[in-house]
Amino acid sequence: MKTFFDHKGSYDLIIEQTFFCAISPEDRSKYARKCQELLKMNGKLVGLLFDFPLTAEGPPYGGDFDSYKNIFSDYFNFRTFEPCYNSIKPRLGRELFFIFEKKIVNKMSRSVILTNEEITNKIRRIAYQIYETNINERKFVLAGISDNGFILAKKIKGSFGKDFSYTGFVVRCEN
């Protein structure tokens, strides 16, 4: 019989509501890893988690902010993680609302790669540095070495946008 952990698919959004609390505490990290695997780039895991002490008796199994942070932080960026203000009366004060965004993880080293926003900000900063360094120049050339270098040079040029007055062009240099 197949389980959630055997599921294949690709999703923009996974909504969590009382599934996680039924999973054995030993499998919770496996659940976080599987959700991260199922989500597309920039995908989100959103929902509610119980906020009461974890006990051996369950389901439902409880947990708290710190234990959830330990389980999910390797796989997700925390966009929102706070007490739920609109729980139903029996759960009032015992739930945490969350929005987690998928981290991009390098499978070889398990290190996190920059998000799209971080990459865009770094490219913009490189563009500003080039501009500041060459502010008195009438022309300059951005040269990209081979494929990825050329792509980066075009992105830097695109970052100048309307903020800068310049005459410049991008050339592609092959090895």
Image: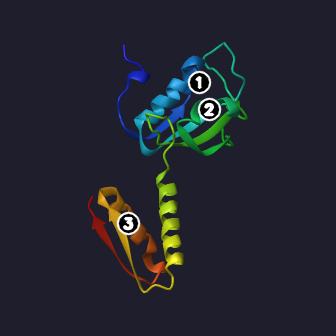
**Residue type beneath disc 1:** Cys
Q: What separation in Å lies between label 3 and label 2 (alpha carbons)?
A: 45 Å
Which quarter of the picture shows residue 93? top right
Q: Secondary structure at mark 1?
A: helix
- Closer to the camera: disc 1 or disc 3? 3
Residue 156 - label: none
Left or right, 52 with reference to 173: right
**Horizontal and vertical percent position of residue 67:** 67, 29
Q: Is residue 163 visible?
A: yes
Q: Label 1 belongs to which residue?
A: 21
**Is label 1 in contact with label 2 (beta carbons under 8 Å)?**
yes
Earlier sequence position, callout 1 versus callout 3? 1
**Horizontal and vertical percent position of residue 133:** 52, 76
Q: What separation in Å lies between label 1 and label 2 (alpha carbons)?
A: 7 Å
The structure residue drawn at horizontal position 47% and vertical position 33%, both measured from the top left corner, is 35
**Residue type beneath disc 3:** Ala
Q: Is residue 19 visible?
A: no
Q: Secondary structure at mark 2?
A: strand
Q: Label 3 belongs to which residue?
A: 153
Marks counted in the figure total: 3
Packing grade of label 1 (10 A; few <14, some 14-19, many >=20) is many
The structure residue drawn at horizontal position 69% and vertical position 17%, both measured from the top left corner, is 55
Earlier sequence position, callout 1 versus callout 2? 1
Q: How is the image coloured?
A: rainbow
Q: Nearer the viewer, residue 118 or 62?
A: 118
Q: Label 2 belongs to which residue?
A: 49
**Horizontal and vertical percent position of residue 27:** 54, 20
**Horizontal and vertical percent position of residue 145:** 33, 61
The structure residue drawn at horizontal position 62% and vertical position 20%, both measured from the top left corner, is 60
In this picture, is 21 found above or below 152?
above
In this picture, is 173 found above or below 8?
below
Left or right, 92 with reference to 8: right
